[in-house]
Amino acid sequence: MKVALLLGIIVVAICLVQADAGYSHLSSFIKRLNAQRTSKASSILAKLKKKAEDYFKNKGYTKHESKSKESEDESVDESYESFESEEESQNQSEDVDGTLDTLYDELCSAKCQKNDLLCKRVLYKYVRPLCRYKDASKAVYALRHKIGCINMAYRVKLICRVSKKSSGCKYAKKVKAFCDAGKNEDASTTSSTTSSTTSPTTSPTTSATTSPTTSATTSSTTSATTSSTSTPMTTTFDPFCDSFTGICRGSCQSDETDFDTCDNGERCCVAGV
C-alpha cells in the first residue's frame, strides 16, 4: 500500500514537471510569434508610409505641409489676408506689383516645376487662355467681362489652401492682380464709350425737330433712324470656356474663325477682340 502511494506521488510529480516544461515552451513560442507579427506589421507600416510620402512628393507636397487641418486653414487665411493687405497698400511685391503689361508678360512667361501639378492646372485654366491674345488690354477686357474675374479672390484662396508653396498659388495671385489692374482699363473704356455714344445722337434729333416743314422733319427723322439702326452692334464673344462648368458663355463675332472646344463640345472664340 505504501509502495503504491509512493509510486502515485512520483507519477504526479513527473506530470507536474512535464506540464511546467510544456507551459514554458508554449509561452516562449507565443512570445516569438508576437515578435514576428510585430516586426512584420512594422515593415508593412514602413512600406505604406514610404509609398504615401512618395505619392505626396510626386504631387508636389512636402512633409511640412502634413499638419492639422485647423492650423492649415488658419495659416492659409492669414496668408491670404496678408496678400489682400499688401494689395491694398500697393507694397512692392512680386505677386501684385507692376503695370498691366508687366503682369501680362510675367504670366505669359510663367513656368512650372516637373512635379507641380497644381501650378500646371492654374496655368491651363487661367493663364494660357490669356496669352492667346498677345496683348494685355485685349486680354484684360476678355478676362474681366467674362468668367475669368468672377469670384477670383475666392478661387485664389482655394488654390493656395491646397499648397502655399506651389507656384500655382503665386500665379493665381498674379491673375487676380491682373483682374484688379484692369479696373482702370474698364473705367477709361466706359467713359470713352459713353462720351462717344451720347454726342452723335442728340444733334440729328434736334436738327430734325427744328426743321420748318413736316416733310423735312420726317425725312431727317427717317434718315437718322436708318443710320442709327444700320450701325452694327458690338457683339460679345467668349475668349475661353467657363473654368468651372466647361460651357461657352456669350456669342462669337460674325468674322471670328479661331475657336476652341469646351468640355461639353461647344466652340468658343479665342482670337483677339
Image: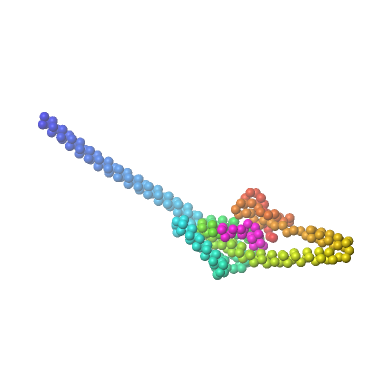
Q: Residue at x 50, y 60 (%)?
A: 76
Q: Taking 24 as reference, is 208 left or right?
A: right
Q: Residue at x 65, y 59 (%)?
A: 145
- The stretch of residues the image draws in magenta is 137-155
User: Residue 11: which quarter of the image?
Assistant: top left
Colour setup of the view: rainbow
109 in magenta: no
Q: Nearer the viewer, residue 78 or 32?
A: 78
Q: Nearer the viewer, residue 48 or 80?
A: 80
Q: Residue at x 40, y 51 (%)?
A: 46
Q: Residue at x 52, y 59 (%)?
A: 160
Do we see residue 201 in this rendering?
A: yes
Residue 133: x and y in percent read 66, 61
Residue found farthest to the left: 2
Q: Taking 272 as reference, is 170 left or right?
A: left
147 in magenta: yes
Q: Nearer the viewer, residue 74 or 265?
A: 74
Residue 21: x and y in percent read 23, 40
Do we see residue 94 in this rendering?
A: no
Q: Quadrant of the N terminus?
A: top left
Residue 59: x and y in percent read 50, 55
Residue 150: x and y in percent read 61, 58
Residue found farthest to the top: 1
Picture layout, residue 4 above or below residue 248: above
Q: Provide the major secondary structure of the magenta segment.
A: helix
User: Residue 189: which quarter of the image?
Assistant: bottom right
Q: Quadrant of the C terminus?
A: bottom right
Q: Taking 225 as reference, is 121 left or right?
A: left
Q: Taking 261 as reference, is 86 left or right?
A: left
